[in-house]
Image: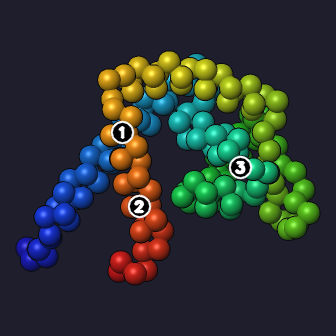
Amino acid sequence: MNKSKRTPAGDALTDLILDFFRLNSLLLTAGDRLVAELGLTSARWQVLGAIVAAERPQPVAWLARDMGANRQNLQRIVNDLEKDGLVAFEINPHHRRAQLVVLTEKGKQAFDAAMRLQAPWINKLADGLSIKDLQTVHRLILTLRKRLGSDAELL
């Protein structure tokens, strides 16, 4: 098998990315367990969080863009949330077909309950970790996201 030679930094980043994949799987599983009693999954919780974080109601396509997610997958999750009464669709004055997604009162309560469960969990997970190290990793992730977001120059 013909392999291209990676630089030492390329090897280190490959190892880091493989560990990110493993970490992501563990985080999704932990999130699913954390909010299961609320009738949520990690994916649903993430979508509710994106809606809360948005400055104003947004269509699914914008939420997907902000989350770095596939629009069709996000549409399916939003439709499920709507069936469960956690979100509603409102008319978008700027685009007839792209309805705005908003939290219902039930959705707000579910998200707030999830965050009440998240606080002690995340505090325990963060116990003993250096804030400086966490901030360094965060900056690294943001840099990689930025580079991947304009990946045309990388290919």
Q: Is residue 154 above or below residue 44?
A: below
Front-most of residues 127 and 1? 127
| Direction from residue 104 to residue 80 in the image, left or right | left
Report the amino acid beneath label 1: Lys
Splitting the image into 4 quarters, where does residue 66 fall? Answer: bottom right
Query: Residue 73, position in %: x, y?
Result: 58, 54
Which kind of residue does numbered mark 2 sit on?
Thr
> Residue 143 got which mark?
2
The disc label shown at residue 132, or none: 1
Q: Is residue 128 visible?
A: yes
Count the marks: how many? 3
Residue at the spot of label 3: 54
- The picture places residue 115, in percent across and down from the top left corner, at 61, 26
Q: From the viewer's side, name the closer residue of 97 and 21.
A: 21
| Amino acid on which disc 3 is placed | Ala
Q: Residues within 10 Å of mark 3 (few under 14, many from 20)?
A: few
Q: Residue at x 46, y 65 (%)?
A: 146
Tell me where residue 70 appears, x and y as whole percent: 56, 60
Foreground: disc 3 or disc 2: 2
Task: Please state which of the two labelled residues, at mark 1 or mark 3, is closer to the viewer.
Answer: 1
**Is disc 1 surrounded by few (<14), some (14 to 19) or many (20+) residues within 10 Å?**
few
Q: Residue at x 32, y 23 (%)?
A: 128
Q: Residue at x 36, y 47 (%)?
A: 136
SS for callout 1? helix
